[in-house]
Image: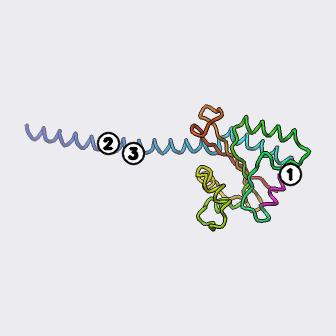
Amino acid sequence: MKNKKGFVFIETIIVTCILLASLMVIYSLYVNSLNVESRYLKYDDPVKLYETYYISKYLESFDFKLLKENIKNGAKYERIFLSRSDIFGSSYTKEVKFLEDLWAKLHIKSMYLFPHNIKDLAECNSYESNDKVFKDAICTNTNLITYLRNIDDVEPNKYVFVVEFASTKGGDKCSSRDCFHYYAHLEVGD
């Protein structure tokens, strides 16, 4: 009779260990899928991709090619500001106002134009200490660097147009504490 009790006890321990191991595997797969889904929601969400596409088409209707020329001439990247006169020129005040309204409605934080070798830019440690402007503007934005590391390099004659959106989870305007950063990018050519 004692042998039966010992066998049941050992059998219970073995079954419990198998169940715990199975639950640990299931939990790790669940956490991994949540992390992947979270990344997909923040990076290249289809809605943000559409918005980025139309913004790039709007900017290309002006002198967007001047920014591409700056990169060809040695600039590491171009940050697009609303007040950049080299994009719009002085005679486009209505267009600048339209872009300001669009910027506010879509909750755009920043827009960038990067060269084709974007993975090199994401490695901030490889730049010399005398490149302080680049390190201050790009390397301090850890969300952007993480996103840039997820983008594959593109063809040498293409550029990467990146838009950083910042909003609350509900899609409203955010303050610095409750901001979530969303990114989308497009390849743009000559």
Which quadrant: the N terminus?
top left
What's the mark number on residue 20?
2
Q: Amino acid at mark 2?
A: Leu
Q: CA distance from mark 2 to mark 3?
A: 9 Å
What's the mark number on residue 25?
3
**Is the stretch drawn in magenta largely helix, strand or loop?**
helix
Q: Residue furthest left?
A: 1
Which quadrant: the C terminus?
bottom right
Q: CA distance from mark 1 to mark 2?
A: 62 Å
Looking at the picture, tell me which residue is in the foreground, 14 or 74.
74
Q: Residue 140: horizontal and vertical position, in percent?
A: 60, 54
30 relative position to 21: left or right: right
> Residue at point 65% right, 60% down?
121
Colour scheme employed for the rendering of this structure: rainbow
**Against 119, is 90 above or below?**
above
Magenta part of the chain: 62-70
Q: Residue 5: horizontal and vertical position, in percent?
A: 13, 38
**Element at badge 1?**
loop
Q: Amino acid at mark 3?
A: Val
79 relative position to 126: left or right: right
Residue 64 sits inside the magenta stretch: yes
Q: Earlier in the sequence, mark 1 or mark 2?
A: 2
Q: Amino acid at mark 1?
A: Asp
Looking at the picture, tell me which residue is in the foreground, 40 or 101.
101
Label 3 Cα neighbours within 10 Å, binned few <14 / some 14-19 / many ≥20: few
